[in-house]
Amino acid sequence: MSEPRKTALVVGANGVIGGNLIDHLLTLDDWDTVGLSRRGGVSTDRVGYIAVDLLDRDATDHALAELSGVTHIFYAAYQDRPSWAELVPPNLAMLVNVVDAIEPVAKGLQHISLMQGYKVYGAHLGPFKTPARESDANHMPPEFNIDQQAFLERRQIDQSWTWSALRPSVVIGFGLGNPMNLAMVIAIYASMSKELGLPLRFPGKPGAYDSLLEMTDAGLLARATVWAATTPACANQALNITNGDLFRWSEMWPRIAAYFKMEVAPPLPMNLSTIMADKEPLWADMVARHGLANVSYLDVSSWPFGDAVFGWNYDFFADGSKARRLGFHQHVDTATMFFSVFDDLRARKIIG
């Protein structure tokens, strides 16, 4: 007997997380998908895209009014702001607007999946308790991830749908124009260093080269997200989702340099946002001379995020055993993940 069809509403469809989630849903025969983003996308018979500004309440209501068949909301939208406090109003409002628009029309709504991260544990603020666990106490606000979950917890009372909160580490996968894309940071930084005849230097803070950390493959996260949304034991639960291995940049960096056929030089603290600000002409020259895809420098630059990640001079990892206890046993080798993403970037002619 075939499974009843489900309809996913992927909010933030063009990001690294949302885009890879849609790719995974396309491999599942019993899912239809609608993608939401400000830019929209090219619709097919399996995926329909809607362009909408989720901060506009009326526009959101209008755009989603016909989506009566939605069974699962996968929320992975994000808007950046200059400060932690300024992040709260827009990111909470977008989630509220989506739920307010869908809940009255989608009578068969079963689940709302919320994408979070280690900011819930205060990882962005400085050294935090490791391994971080889902049961750890919240930290002092402001923190939009915590406010979003609190909203879902309140809203779910007396409802037939459930929620889950996925907490990946740094998510690695393909995506252009994303403010949090570490794979792109490394690939473009390495490519430009090589173009200039330089060795590959780790640019992070002193101590970050030897800190213990982990990553989350975007494909693994997509599979875990759908699993959590369709597994009753995960109802109303938060779950850390990680590759399952730990590493230090001092071991990973030489392997990345070897991939790009580069020498390694000793680490040197450099603010990427500053030193890469004047590199747009170099990028344009590389695109022309190497026949790369005509992608703007802005769309391949996530330098502030690189500065943040390479600035973690403290351990950065969480306990992923809760998901394993509930039945998700997949894992990914982190070095292999990096090389796979770099291969993909070469195949797409983003790098040479």
Image (tube, grey):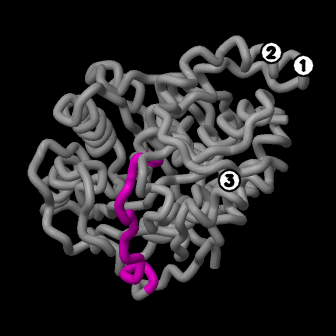
Secondary structure beneath dot 1 equals helix
Query: Given the image, on which type of amino acid does mark 1 rest?
Result: Arg
Query: Given the image, on which type of amino acid does mark 2 rest?
Result: Asp
Q: What residue is disc 1 on?
A: 289
Query: Given the image, on which type of amino acid does mark 3 rest?
Result: Leu
Q: What residue is disc 3 on?
A: 26
Compare residues 171 and 11 and report the one nearer the observer.
171
Image point (62%, 66%), residue name: 251
Whole-number angstrom distance, CA of label 2 to CA of label 1 = 6 Å
Q: What percent of the width, then of the height, locates residue 61?
A: 32, 27
Number of marks present in the image shown: 3
Q: What residue is disc 2 on?
A: 285
Q: What percent of the width, then of the height, locates residue 212?
A: 45, 68
Query: Is residue 109 in view?
Result: no
How crowded pointer 1 is (Cα within 10 Å; few <14, some 14-19, many 20+) is rated as: few
Image point (84%, 49%), residue name: 261
Compare residues 283 and 209 and report the one nearer the observer.
209
Whole-number angstrom distance, CA of label 2 to CA of label 3 = 37 Å
Quarter residue 123 falls in: bottom left
> In the image, is residue 322 part of the stretch drawn in magenta?
yes
Q: What percent of the width, then of the height, locates residue 190?
A: 70, 40
> In the image, is residue 262 part of the stretch drawn in magenta?
no
Secondary structure beneath dot 2 equals helix
Residue with the most extreme front position: 266
| Dot 2 and dot 1 residues touching (CB under 8 Å) | yes
Q: Which residues are magenta?
A: 309-324
Q: What percent of the width, then of the height, locates residue 7?
A: 51, 52
